[in-house]
Amino acid sequence: MAFEDKEAELGLLLSRMQNQPQDAHELYELVRQKLNEMKAYGMPLPADLVQFERDLEAEFLAEGADRRRRARLDKLIAERARR
């Protein structure tokens, strides 16, 4: 598959992320797959998309940390409220 085709597929995925933000995790995985396909074919990876992948990964890790922190806070509040 041509580099231009892969870039077009990535463009469509990014448009979907913009229009369907509730599916961001699923679409992120699809973007990662496309970038990995490009790597496998020896195609050059666009620097902005490589950075985009890194930034999304960091954002999703932060969201996970926020959820865990919120769960700890909620647990403590619930336990202390019963006393």
Image: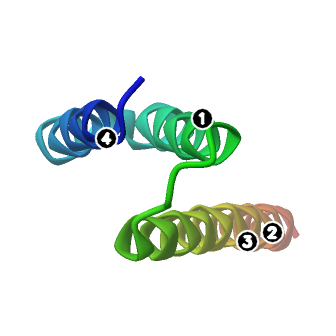
Marks 3 and 4, how far apart at CA: 44 Å
Which of 18 and 41 lies nearest the eye of the viewer?
41
Front tag of 3 and 4: 4
- The kind of secondary structure element at disc 4 is helix
- 74 on left or right of 26: right
Disc 4 marks a residue whose amino acid type is Leu
The local secondary structure at tag 2 comes to helix
Q: Along the horizontal axis of the image, is 81 left or right of 8?
A: right
Dot label at residue 37: 1
**In percent of the image, x 50 and y 65: which residue is there?**
56
Determine whether label 3 and label 2 are within 8 Å by CB. Answer: no
Image quarter of residue 6 = top left
For discs 4 and 2, the disc positioned in front in the rendered view:
4
Left or right, residue 9 beside residue 56: left
Q: Give coordinates of residue 72: x percent, y percent.
A: 80, 69
Please report whichever mark, 3 or 4, sits nearer to the chain's N-terminal start.
4
Sequence-wise, which precedes: disc 4 or disc 2? 4
Of label 1 and label 4, which has the lower sequence position? 4
Camera-side residue of 69 and 43: 43
Residue at x 64%, y 48% (from the top left corner): 39
Structural crowding at the residue carrying mark 4, measured as other residues with C-alpha within 10 Å and reported as few (<14), some (14–19) or many (≥20): many
Side of 74 where 12 appears, left or right = left
Type of amino acid at the residue the image marks with label 1 = Glu
Q: Which residue, given by chain and number where applicable, does mark 4 sit on?
A: 10
Determine whether label 3 and label 4 are within 8 Å by CB: no
Please tell me whether mark 1 sits on a helix, a strand or a loop.
helix
Residue on which disc 3 sits: 77
Disc 2 designates what residue? 72
What is the C-alpha distance between the residues marked 1 and 4? 11 Å
